[in-house]
Image: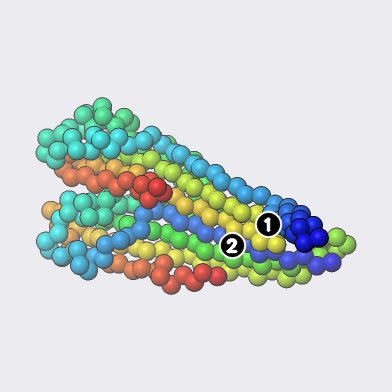
Amino acid sequence: MRERGYLSLQIAGVILLGFFIQGCFVGNYYGGQKVLAERIKDIKPGITTREEIIQWFGPPRNYVSPTVINHLLTQIDITDEPISEYPFANILSYQYDVGRLKALIFILFNHVELDMKSDHLVIFFDDDERVKYFGFRKGTEEFK
Amino acid sequence: MLLSGCTVGRVYVGAEIMENPDTRIVIGSTTKSDILGIYGPPRRVQRQYDGDLFIYSYFRKNSSTLNIEEPVVTDLTIFTYTRVQQKKDSLVILFDKDGVVKNYGFYRETEELTPY
């Protein structure tokens, strides 16, 4: 008798959950070309040239079109500024964006979370086209 | 029949500014190279006639919405409550022509965010 009671309770619980939990959504976004972190140690200020940088890392982000996510974030009014901006000839920027979207959809309650992280390398050049200084941040590691 | 629904949204964009600039930056001594080593690439660079400007920012947005509606007969929304909090940690560093920090400003707004 008691077992039947538990079973009914469990069935009722499943039905109730089925009614309230509408769905769960997990989305990942990857934008741009991965920044080769293992080549960062080869960058030597005063020695490495712009040509070598482009050979190692490919075309820089600030010379090609901005990513979809950059457009999206400004278009849907999530943030009013671009993710990054380097409109100068003596700066090369490489950026790999990762976005994580998690959503829990219930009938009465929804929870939506968007987190954007980037691996980002920025390199400044001197007048002789050699690296003057550079900075690198591996932001996507924060997701692990 | 009345139906009420609540939506909670969270948006995080950028890298958190972990290091307190008051302990890491010395005006007239810290260089552009030091700054790139401490904080990584800035979000934006602005060029001015007397030196560059580095802008670091970390953006967070918390939103909560509560709706009460009658979806069957009238399809009326009876009550809507929306609260959006948008805060940004910003660090702006001004360099002289030699690439040495001339001044900086820092404000941590995200601490002011409340959960709901």
Q: Residue farthest to the top?
A: A55
Q: Nearer the viewer, residue B76 or A107?
A: A107
| Numbered circle sitting on residue A106 | 1
**In the picture, residue A98 is in which quadrant?**
top left
Q: What residue type is labelled 1?
A: Phe
Vertical placement of residue B76 versus A30, above or below? below
| Numbered circle sitting on residue B8 | 2
Residue A18 in view, yes or no: yes
| Numbered circle sitting on residue A83 | none
The chain identifier of the residue carrying mark 2 reads B
Q: Which of B100 and A118 is in front in this view?
A: A118
Q: Residue farthest to the front?
A: A1
User: In the drawing, does residue B28 fall left or right of residue A115?
Assistant: left
* Number of callouts: 2
Mark 1 secondary-structure assignment: strand
- Residue at left 52%, top 46%? A72
Vertical placement of residue A140 versus A15, above or below? above
